[in-house]
Amino acid sequence: MPRLEWNDSLSIGIYRVDSQHMRLIEVANDFLRTAGEGRDGEAIQTTLTRLREYTVNHFRDEEAYMREIHYPRLARHQEEHRNLVQRVKQFQRDLYEQRDITVEVMRDFLREWLVGHIINSDLKIAEWLRAEEESRARQEQETKSGGAE
Ligand SMILES: [Fe+2]
């Protein structure tokens, strides 16, 4: 059965975000399982709606987190989230209109849509945090050695 896999390279190292990403992958897999079992259109739409709703809540929380840490690329990231929501809405419409989309095509869409975003954008949050911590540690070190003179 085509599915998405979680692996450690997707971890951004922040439990709050990582645990939601893992859950998102699970919800995406529930949807793929339902579609793969050849369930009726309604069941497929219901699981996809759940994925969409969970995604919207997750984006909201991730944006709140970025605001808390004063992430400088928040606006751009928010814009990406908006685009992702539009794309999954379009995907849902396509699925409604063309019943012959294969589960592999659905999986590939979700992989690019979800895993692609984690790798290309969410991991940047972790990179930025690490750089911030390093520069803070360096500053502290400089203050200390400056004070000793
Ligand atoms: Fe994100």
Image (tube, rainbow, N blue to C red):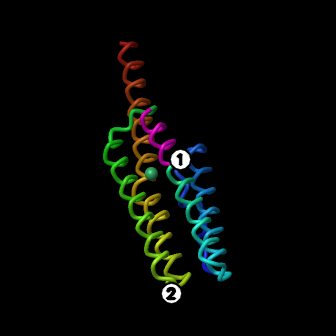
Quarter containing the C terminus: top left
Residue at image x 36%, y 54%? 80
Determine which residue is flagged by label 2.
100
Mark 2 to mark 1 CA distance (whole Å): 30 Å
Q: Which of 23 and 12 is in front in this view?
A: 23
**Residue 111 vs residue 86: left or right?**
right
Q: Which amino acid does label 2 sit on?
A: Asp
Looking at the image, residue 145 lies above or below residue 6: above
Q: Residues within 10 Å of mark 1 (few under 14, many from 20)?
A: few
Looking at the image, residue 4 lies above or below residue 148: below
Looking at the image, residue 78 lies above or below residue 36: above
Q: Which percent across, then down, holds residue 77? A: 36, 48
Q: Which percent across, then down, holds residue 128? A: 40, 43
**Residue 60 vs residue 50: left or right?**
left
**Residue 37 vs residue 96: left or right?**
right
Q: Does the magenta stretch include residue 123?
A: no
Residue at image x 51%, y 83%? 99
Residue 42 sits in which quadrant? bottom right
Q: Nearer the viewer, residue 68 or 138?
A: 68
Quarter containing the N terminus: bottom right
Q: Is residue 63 magenta?
A: yes
Q: Which of 51 and 140 is in front in this view?
A: 51
Determine which residue is flagged by label 1.
57
Residue at image x 44%, y 35%? 133
Q: What residue type is labelled 1?
A: Asn
Residue at image x 64%, y 81%? 36
Span of residues in magenta? 57-67
SS at mark 1 in the image: helix
